[in-house]
Each structure stands twice: as structure tokens, then as C-alpha cells.
Image: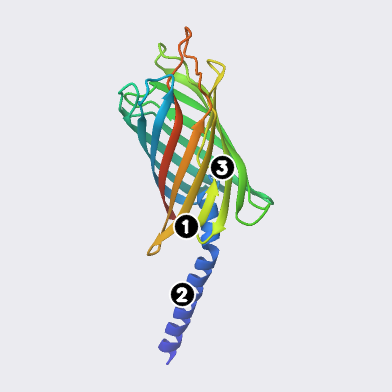
Amino acid sequence: MKKMSIKKTMLSLGYALALSVSSLYSETDLSQKANDPTAPLMAVQLIDNYTSDYYNSLEGESGNSVSFRAAYPYKWGEYNHIARITQPYATDSPSGDTGLADMTLFDMTVFPASWGRFGVGVVAGIPIEGGNKQWSLGPAFGFVNNTITKGLNLGLFNQNLFRIAGDDVRPHTKISSFQPIVNYSLGGGWNIGTGDIQYMYDWESTQWVSLPIALQVGKLHRFGKLPVMFSLQYAHNFADKVNIGNGIFAPTPKNSLTFTAKFLFPTF
């Protein structure tokens, strides 16, 4: 009888724990966290970016890249951290060049606030064969306010990369990127926002090299217990005259479509 009582107690505790985890990560909560780069959420992303046309390029030229991105939250001492790696691979480009592009790594210490979260950390650019062939390093900063109204994320994520070593012949890396975070969970796993757009300023050439506007629509779907966020983003870039010297303008993306599958591990 005593064994049966213990078994019933354990089953009850397990059921209660399952309910609490399910409640903790509701569709709206998980959808909101999936679109917050400061959220302590383990995730693996596959990203396909297709550019249908370019400024300063021949008509009909297009490009495509596939990226792998993984985020891993961990604790070091009393502080919560998020480590992230991004590795792009160009499958098509106006120049015909394909292959691995430079890898980006960052580690951010995240602090809770009454209005949401903010984080400070460091970002590094790792040269890969065929990439920019420069090592770069710089500060990163981000914040998200999720208290304005339920389901809404508003914030900013900033990364800065400055050359510390590498090929002296190529222009030195001195780039700041600003990612506005605007996302609203509509319920039922659906959300809309601006997606992963980057406003980029090149301090070496003193010009904006990326000035996009975008709309992203996403849907959270569960495969058994595994939640996956699928999203589709359209972006238009207004940086149409990126000068690379001697009056020559670089081919810059004009219109792009990005499809993302983000695998989430909320109970890791």
C-alpha cells in the first residue's frame, strides 16, 4: 500500500510539473521568446536568403545564401550568458563567387530588468577561406522591452566589428550593425515583425551600406514536443549607392526573401 502511495505521489508530481512547463511556455510566450535575441532560449536556425535583384548590377542577376545559427544559454557564476554562432554559405552571387563566408561569434551577459532584459557582450568575426580574411572584434549591446503590451517585443541589438589582424591589402573591417527588434505575437503561434534586418554603417568608407525595411510573418508549429518557428521575410534595401572607391558602386541587395526554420529547445 505504501509503495502504491509513493507511486501515485510521484505520478501526481510529474503531472503537475508537465502542466507547469506547458503553462510556462505557452504558444504566445514561446513565440515572443523566439523573436527576442536576449531571451535565454537554446535554438538552432537554418536560414535561406534569396536576393532577387541588385543595385549597380546587370539586370537579372540574383544571389542566395544559406546560414546556420545556434544560440546556447548558460550560466557563469552568478550571471546568465547567451553564446551564438553564425556561419553563412553563399550558393550564388552576382560575381559568381560561392562558398563559406566569415563566421560570427558573440557572447552576451544578460541582465533582467523591470521592463524586460538588456545585455552587454563581445562579438568576433572569424575569417574563413573565401571570406574577408580579417580577424575582427568589438562590443555588442542589446535590450528588449516586453512590458508595453502582452506579446509585443520592442528593442535594439547592436554589434560592432573592428579589424584586429588579417589581410592588409583589403579594406579594414570597421562595421556597426543595428537590428531593430519589433515583433508582435498574434496568438495561436502566429507573429509579425521586422525580422532579422540589419542597418549597417561602414566607418572605413563613412557610409551606410545597408538601410532596409522589412516585414516578417512567422508561425510556431510543434512536431511532437519539439517547437519550430517558421518565418518568411520580405526586405527592401534603400542603400543603392555604396561607393567602393574611384566612383565605383558595389552591387548591393535590392529586394530579398528570407525563409527561416528555428528549432527551439525551451526546456533544455
The residue shown at (47%, 57%) is 266
Q: Can residue 143 be spotted in the picture?
A: no
| Category of crowding for the residue at label 2, using alpha-carbon neighbours closer than 10 angstroms: few (below 14), some (14–19), many (at least 20) | few
The residue shown at (43%, 33%) is 104
- Amino acid type, label 1: Pro
The span from disc 1 to disc 3 (Cα, nearest Å) is 19 Å
Q: Marks 1 and 2: in contact by CB < 8 Å?
A: no
Marks 2 and 1: which is nearer the front? Answer: 1
Q: Is residue 6 rendered to the left or right of residue 65? A: right
Residue at image mark 3: 109
Residue 80, relative to residue 5: is it above or below?
above
In front: 50, or 138? 50
Residue positioned most to the top: 246
In front: 53, or 70? 53
- Amino acid type, label 2: Gly
Secondary element under disc 2, as helix, strand or loop, is: helix
The residue shown at (41%, 14%) is 170
Q: Can residue 247 be spotted in the picture?
A: yes
On residue 266, which mark appears?
1
Q: Picture coordinates of residue 248 (x, y %)?
A: 45, 11
Q: Picture coordinates of residue 5 (x, y %)?
A: 45, 87
Secondary element under disc 3, as helix, strand or loop, is: strand
Of labels 2 and 1, earlier in sequence is: 2
On residue 14, which mark appears?
2
